Amino acid sequence: TNQLASGDFSARLDLKHPPEMAELSDSFNRMATKLGSTELLRSDFVNNFSHEFKTPIVSIRGFAQMLKYGDLTESQRNEYLDIVIAESTRLSGLATNVLNLTKVENQTILTEQAWFNVSEQIRDVVVLLQQKWEEKQLDVTIDGDDVLLFGNAELLGQVWRNLFDNAVKFSPVGGQVR
């Protein structure tokens, strides 16, 4: 227990007798495994978040400086403002992810489950990102029947947004996303 309390999540018990001690040992080991998983999730998230958070801030600062001091055309000014808006939206999404991490830690997000239409969710993502895929002249096709799923719609929605955004981002101009 002292090892676990000091952050060593590999600590395990191997008590066999009496049966109550074996049950305690099993419970302790499950707890240590879950704590280790949560700590790994937290560590990965903090590392990724720190990197992801810094990038849009640097971008916003740079474009704001150019807007303030630059001798820009109206077109350039609008483009830079669009970048600032997009990067601030990205920061907002990162803040939402931090809140979701707290929900995961408290396990409340796992209980926020309901039946929802996955197919409709995917169609909504395609519409949400329509400007991006139209700019790249992508052929986007969605096939399939409606699928109902019992789960957390918000978390799965993030999955679809990330997958489709990456598909658009990494597809060649004029490519296909199916």
Image (cartoon, rainbow, N blue to C red):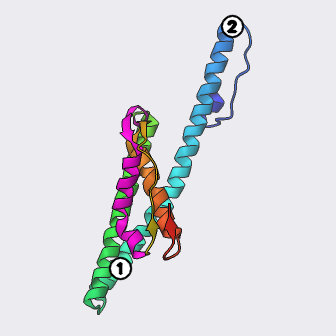
Q: Position of residue 90 (x, y in %)?
A: 38, 62
Look at the numbered disc 2 and give the secondary structure of its residue: helix
Q: Amino acid at mark 2?
A: Pro
Task: Determine the image quadrant of residue 145.
Answer: top left
Residues packed near mark 2 inside 10 Å, few (<14), some (14 to 19) or many (20 plus): few
Q: Position of residue 9 (x, y in %)?
A: 64, 35
Left or right: 33 as drawn, with respect to 169: right
Query: Which one is in front, 152 or 175?
Result: 175
Q: Amino acid at mark 1?
A: Phe
Query: Which one is in front, 107 or 151?
Result: 151
Look at the numbered disc 1 and give the secondary structure of its residue: helix
Q: Which residues are magenta?
A: 109-136
Q: Which residue is mark 1?
A: 63
Q: Position of residue 32 (x, y in %)?
A: 62, 30
Q: Which residue is mark 2?
A: 19
Query: Residue drawn at (70%, 22%), measured in percent from left and top?
Result: 13
